[in-house]
Amino acid sequence: MQPLLATRSFLQRALFDTPQDTPRLSTRALTWARIVSVVALIAGGALLAIALHIRPGDGLFYPVTLGVAAVWAAAGIAGGGLRRGVAVSGRGRKISPAGQGAVLGIALLAIFLVGAVVVAQIPLLRGPVDGLLDHARFGALPAVLAVTVVTGLAEELFFRGTLYDAVPSRLAVPVTTLLYAVVTSVSGVPLLIFASLILGSVTALQRRATGGQLGPMITHIVWSAGMLLLLPPVLDYL
C-alpha cells in the first residue's frame, strides 16, 4: 500500500498540482505567440514529413531532421524561450523539475518497452516501426542519437512553450497534445502517433504543473533516447 500511496503522491505533484504564479501574456504577446505557432506548425510539419520519408542510411536525413528541430527551436525562442519552472518535493520544498522529468521519462520508457512485446506479434504494427528504426540500424547511431536528443529538446521548447502559451489556459493541455499528434501523424506510423498522444499528454501536464519546459524536456529525451537505443534489440529479440 505504501508504494502505491507514494506513487500517487508523486504523480499528483509532478502532473496535477498547478503553480499559482503562472504568468499571463499581454494581448500583443499572445497575438505574436499565435502567429509564430501557426507558421512553425506549417513549416515544421512539412519538413518532418520529408525527413521521415527519407530512405534509411541516406545522409540527407540528418540535415533535414535538424532543420525540423531548428524550426521548433526558433519558434520556441521567438515566443519567450526556456522557462525552467518549479517542482515541489514530497516535503513541500520547491525544487528543479529535472528529477521528476527523469523519473517520468523512465516510467514511460518501461511502459512502451513492455508494449513492444505486443507490437512484435502484429506485423501490421511492427512493419512501420521497423521502418522508422532502420535509421538507427543502418545510419550512424551516435548521429541519430544526437539528432533525437536535439529534436526532443526543440519540440518541448516550442510545443510546451510558445504553442502552450498561445492557447487559452483551460484548453492548453488537450489542444497542444492534439496538435503534437497531428504533426506526428505525417510519419504514417500508427504507434508513433499513439506515442505522441501519451508523451504529449504527460509533458503538457508537466508544463501546467511546473510552469516551465525543463521537466518536459528531460522526460522527452529520456524516453526518446531510451526508445532509440533499447527498442531495436527488444524487437530483434522478439
Image (spheres, rainbow, N blue to C red):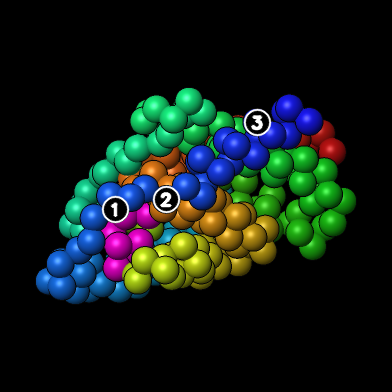
Name the residue that disc number 3 marks: 6
Q: Earlier in the sequence, mark 1 or mark 3?
A: 3
Q: Quadrant of residue 95?
A: top left
Residue at point 20%, 53% (across, down): 80
Left or right of 23, for residue 102: right
Mark 1 crowd level (few <14, some 14–19, many ≥20, 10 Å Cα): some
Residues shaded magenta = 160-166
Q: Is residue 228 left or right of residue 206?
A: right
Q: Position of residue 200 (x, y in %)?
A: 51, 56
Q: Callout 2, which amino acid?
A: Thr
The majority secondary structure of the magenta stretch comes to helix
Instruction: Tell whether position 167 is magenta.
Output: no
Mark number, residue 22 = 1
Q: Residue at x 29, y 68 (%)?
A: 166
Q: How many marks?
A: 3
Q: What residue did someone put label 2 on?
A: 18
